[in-house]
Image (spheres, rainbow, N blue to C red):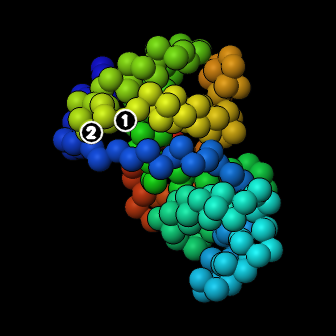
Amino acid sequence: MGLLKRCEEVCLKSRNYNGEIVAGSLLVKESRHVAALLLSGADEKTFHQAIVVDNVLQKRSPASAKRMLKLIRKRLEGMSSELWLMVRDGNQELATQALLCAAIKHSHLLGDFLNSTIRSHKRTFKKQLTLHDWSSFFEECQHLDPEVGDWVESTLKKIRQVVFRILAEAKVIDSTRLMTLLPFALHPDIKKYLSFKGEDYVLKCLESTQ
């Protein structure tokens, strides 16, 4: 069953994909800093001081730091402060899965890949992802959002690289080289949070990896 059929099953007749995911993978260390700022109620002046002046994200230029901040804030601000706490204070596993949730909600390209291709692999006991899997998935994405077909090749390649890096960081696959699917255990705190907040799409995507 293809992505188009799967999406119809959950009443998604169309998509509006974005390529913002190219700006970075899960960025756990950097996201802890941003989560701390959000939880402190930092205003824009405080963000500027931390990100540009103090360079807490340790980027080579203010422009790079601002781009990374923009991505992380978009992801985190799509979720609630309870998740920010998991990012700031959680151990590596909890913080990583919390950021995976935020990335899925921010990028349906990532979420739909989990919910279609990886779900299919798990059901049919396929143990490895391939570049062909991604190409097939992306072809189907164009049926849901024709504008995806206008993206340049360099953007498509970067998106693929970042998506697979995210999967490796979250331990959905073993590495970006072998792309072997790993047993994935959803952290109980993450499952509880998603259920309580009604984040059904994100939860469905994560459950597809199990």
Q: Tell me which residue sits at (66%, 70%) in the image.
A: 35
| Quadrant of the snapshot with the N terminus | top left
Query: Residue 209 appears at what percent x and percent y?
Result: 54, 33
Note whether 139 is above or below 72 in the view shown: above
- For the residue pair 45 and 17, the one nearer the viewer reads as 45
Determine which quarter of the picture holds residue 184. Answer: top right
For the point 57% across and 49% down, which residue is it? 23
Alpha carbon separation for disc pair 1 and 2: 7 Å
Amino acid type, residue under disc 1 in the picture: Trp
Q: With respect to residue 120, does 63 lie above or below?
A: below
In the image, residue 14 lies at what x, y percent?
A: 22, 42
Q: Amino acid at mark 2?
A: Glu
Secondary structure under tag 2 reads helix
- Residue displayed at 76% across by 76% down: 53
Q: Residue at x 72, y 72 (%)?
A: 52
**Tag 2: Cα neighbours inside 10 Å, few (<14), some, or many (≥20)?**
some
Q: Are marks 1 and 2 in contact (CB under 8 Å)?
A: yes
Residue receiving disc 1: 151
